[in-house]
Amino acid sequence: MIRIKGVLAFLLITFGITYSVEIALIYHGVRFDPYPPPWAVPVVASLMWVPGVAALVTVRFITKEGRHVLRIRRGPLRPYLVTALVIPGVFALVYALTWLLNLGDPEWHLASFLAEMASQGGDVSAVPPAWILIPAVLGASVVFAPFVNALFGFGEELGWRGYLLPQLMPLGKPRAYLLVGLIWGLWHAPLLAAGFSYGPGNAAVNILVFVLLTTGLGVYINEMSLRYRSSVLAGWIHGVFNCQAYGVWPILFVNINPLLGGKTGLVAAAVWLALGLLEAQRSKRHDGVLRVTKMPAGGPPGGGE
């Protein structure tokens, strides 16, 4: 049974705070074309913790269920190690498909990145050659950066996968997954309208494509968080995703159509959905094995030939 009061309170707090701050930023001229002003970056980053705070407030003061319902547990280490490798591999596949489908080409010498850096007043003479820089940035995004980014990812996932997803599961997986993907995507709507991820363009199209991405990616995160009953793992996956999204790939692939290729395009949405569906099949097999191993030695009650 869905606790409507709790879900509505969570959504009102989450969207009320986030939209108020983001609309204020946009009113004061903040745009993502391609970068916001430096002072706005920490403000936007801090908003990643709004869903988590909303979840804590909801279970403490509104539904009074207690924090245990948020699944704040680490769980086994293996899925953390696996996802730390799988997610960079998925990004490599997404950008390989982007290249093969002629949606964007890699700049192996990082010409556009260096030109942009110089235009911002950076000292490009201090930048190591591309054959050193590319693997160094990729390595840092896999080994070190996830531990920082996961702190912000957990802020979101404590809300999305810690609170909202379990509350919607009585609707069944398909409806719950679609609703979480839709809500997660629409939560970004003001920033998307201001050019976040896609640049200036048709705001409605930007939001639609991003919802497809959050829905596809959401299937994968949903499956992992439900299987291991851990919103901490969901935060880790979210953080690892962001490490790749803002790591080596955007500086290697600069001139792409973001609605179709790259980290936020339809190609990425399709690849993440496919991976999520594969994980859903694994979950079914995993659940089946558990049921068999827990069955009494004599077979199911009342069984016969």
Image (cartoon, rainbow, N blue to C red):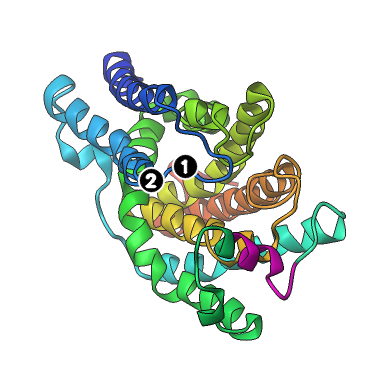
Depicted 238 relative to depicted 70: above or below: below
The residue positioned 72% from the left and 60% from the top of the image is 95
**Can residue 269 be seen from the camera position used here?**
yes
Q: How far across and how far down the image is residue 287, in percent?
A: 49, 51
| x then y, percent, for residue 280 | 58, 48
Q: Residue at x 45, y 28 (%)?
A: 29
Q: Which residues are magenta?
A: 107-116
Q: Residue 145's x, y, as percent?
A: 40, 67
Crowd tier of the residue under label 2, counting other residues whose Cα lies within 10 Å: few below 14, some 14–19, many 20 or above? few
Query: In this figure, which residue is indicated by the disc labeled 2?
Result: 41
> Camera-side residue: 6 or 227?
6
Three-letter amino acid code at the position of disc 2 = Val
Residue, disc 1: 36
Sequence-wise first label, 2 or 1: 1
Q: Which kind of residue does numbered mark 1 sit on?
A: Pro
Corner quadrant of residue 62: top left
